[in-house]
Image: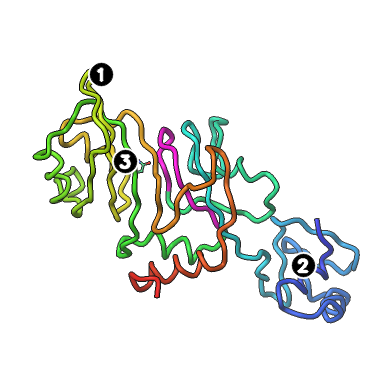
């Protein structure tokens, strides 16, 4: 909870002293009701208006999370399951995930309260590469992998060409590990792509999002992005390159 005049001043609408004056003059509303007391405290979710215009409350913040499996890529879950924002208990800003990873998929997920940034990164026209490591049931031949590299027909249309590498093969157990890089973000896309060539995914992890990796993080840990990383991501989404 913060004092109303401080919140107004932080939003850049007015100086602290001017904000106090606006409050006394009855120009400030909290959740639709005029508030004239200077000591009033507001929380991050209260709606504050100055002269009828809602102020921008929050600083824009940007995080990455190493999402564990069995966690929902959402801010709430009606079934009470763990959600990705549970891993940021001390963050006051109302962050939400940029896109989603399946409940069963682990790996790199971005979270922010910057809607414009989130939309930019999720826009289908951008070519941001995401790299996944998949454990497959079976061992695909080069010929089968080539199908993914060319683009494969799924029920919602052809996929763009993917980069695929088989990292290891366990013939005895009938399993293999493959790395796949795609720039689209359709629902359960990687699982459906491998399913389409006859090699179901048993385990899936997103290792890389653009130039960001999980380096230094354990499952369930997150970190703030640096201003430079945010700038580079924006440039990459807008222009396809980071310079
Ligand atoms: N592709 C999938 O199949 N699942 C994910 O969570 C992400 C990409």
Q: Nearer the viewer, mark 1 or mark 3?
A: 1
Residue identifier under label 1: 173
Residue found at the far left of this picture: 143
* Residue 173 % position (x, y): 25, 18
* Residue 200 % position (x, y): 24, 30
95 relative to 191 in the view: left or right: right
Residue identifier under label 2: 7
Q: Is residue 108 above or below residue 137?
A: below
Q: Is residue 192 above or below residue 172?
A: below
Image quadrant containing the N terminus: bottom right
- What element does badge 3 sit on? loop
Would you say the beta carbon of the disc 3 residue lies within 8 angstroms of ligand 1?
yes
| Residue drawn at 82 percent across, 77 percent down | 19
Q: Which mark is residue 188?
A: 3
Q: Nearer the viewer, mark 2 or mark 3?
A: 3
Q: CA distance from mark 2 to mark 3?
A: 41 Å
| Residue drawn at 56 percent across, 41 percent down | 76
Ligand 1 occupies quarter? top left
- What element does badge 1 sit on? loop
User: 10 Å neighbourhood of mark 3: few (<14), some, or many (≥20)?
Assistant: few
User: 10 Å neighbourhood of mark 2: few (<14), some, or many (≥20)?
Assistant: many
> Sequence-wise, which precedes: disc 2 or disc 1?
2
- The stretch of residues the image draws in magenta is 100-112
Q: Is residue 212 above or below residue 100?
A: below
Q: CA distance from mark 1 to mark 3?
A: 25 Å
> Sequence-wise, which precedes: disc 1 or disc 3?
1
In which image quadrant can residue 89 be found?
top right
């Amino acid at each position: 909870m913060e004092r109303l005049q401080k919140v107004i001043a932080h939003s850049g609408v007015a100086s602290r002293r001017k904000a106090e004056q606006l409050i006394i003059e009855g120009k400030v509303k909290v959740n639709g009701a005029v508030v004239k007391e200077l000591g009033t405290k507001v929380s991050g979710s209260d709606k504050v208006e100055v002269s009828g215009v809602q102020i921008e409350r929050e600083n824009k913040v940007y995080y990455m999370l190493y999402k564990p499996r069995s966690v929902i890529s959402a801010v709430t879950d009606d079934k009470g399951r763990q959600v990705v924002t549970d891993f940021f208990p001390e963050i006051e800003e109302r962050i939400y995930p940029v896109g989603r990873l399946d409940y069963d998929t682990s790996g790199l997920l971005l979270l922010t309260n910057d809607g414009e940034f989130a939309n930019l990164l999720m826009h289908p026209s951008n070519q941001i590469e995401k790299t996944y490591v998949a454990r497959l049931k079976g061992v695909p031949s080069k010929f089968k992998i080539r199908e993914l590299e060319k683009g494969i027909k799924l029920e919602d249309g052809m996929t763009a060409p993917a980069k695929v590498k088989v990292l290891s093969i366990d013939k005895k157990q009938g399993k293999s590990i493959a790395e796949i890089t795609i720039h689209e973000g359709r629902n359960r896309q990687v699982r459906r792509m491998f399913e389409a060539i006859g090699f179901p995914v048993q385990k899936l992890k997103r290792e890389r999002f653009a130039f960001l990796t999980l380096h230094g993080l354990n499952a369930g840990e997150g970190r703030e992005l640096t201003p430079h990383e945010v700038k580079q991501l924006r440039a990459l989404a807008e222009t396809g390159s980071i310079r």
